[in-house]
Image (tube, rainbow, N blue to C red):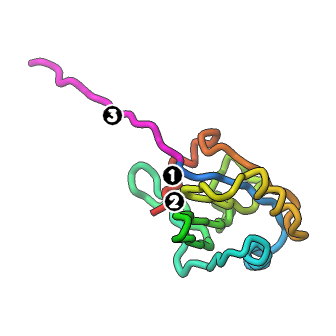
Amino acid sequence: MKKPKKHTLEFDVDYDYDMIGICSPNNDYRIVWSMNELLTIQLEKSAENFVIVNHKGDIKSEHPFYQFSDEENFLEMFFIKNKHEAKYLIPENKQIDYFFFLLHNQLHKIPDLITKLKTIPTIHGAYEFDPTDFASTEFIIFE
């Protein structure tokens, strides 16, 4: 009997978001309040956690998050805590406390946005990251 052929489906992940890492010892609500004031946005805490699911469909981790939708500019923003219940959103970058994601961003220049974020006294550092640099970003899916 012939051995059946095995086919492997491969696809490239398209990251349609900008990713900023934020270092701060402060609570998320204090940082979000300052960001809302500075950027004139309205990040609001979601009632549910941001869920990371593996290839098998099992939940890897859950993280509190804030979100804002700018319908006029087709822009969505997510502010997500990196470490929650001893699990990381981006385990390759454990020194980052929060991640700020901008989906479909055509409005903000990231270097200018980072410069603005660094003016907030509770933020000690803000850094741009390329999602392709981290394997774990494959599991970050915004719906």
Q: The magenta stretch spans which residues? A: 1-15
Choose between 63 and 42: the one closer to the eye. Answer: 42
In this image, 124 relative to 102: left or right?
Answer: right
Identify the mark at residue 9; answer none if there is no mark: 3
Choose between 11 and 34: the one closer to the eye. Answer: 34
Q: Position of residue 132 (x, y in %)?
A: 59, 40
Which corner quadrant of the image does residue 117 belong to?
Answer: bottom right
Name the residue beneath numbered marker 2. 52
Badge 3 vs badge 2, beta-carbon distance below 8 Å? no
Which tag, 1 or 2, sits closer to the chain's start? 2
Q: Position of residue 26 (x, y in %)?
A: 83, 72
Q: Residue at x 49, y 56 (%)?
A: 141
Of helix, strand and loop, which one carries label 3?
loop
Q: Is residue 13 magenta?
A: yes
In this image, 74 relative to 98: left or right?
Answer: left
Three-letter code for the amino acid on which mark 2 is drawn? Ile
Of helix, strand and loop, which one carries label 1?
helix
Name the residue beneath numbered marker 1. 139
Which tag, 1 or 3, sits closer to the chain's start? 3
Choose between 62 and 118: the one closer to the eye. Answer: 118
Q: Residue at x 76, y 79 (%)?
A: 33
Q: Position of residue 114 (x, y in %)?
A: 79, 56
Which corner quadrant of the image does residue 12 belong to?
Answer: top left
Three-letter code for the amino acid on which mark 1 is drawn? Phe
Spatial separation of the CA atoms under disc 3 and disc 2: 22 Å
Q: Is residue 88 magenta?
A: no
Give the class, few, some or many, for how many residues have Cα within 10 Å of label 2's Cα (few <14, many ≥20): many
Relative to 79, does residue 91 appear above or below in the rendering? above
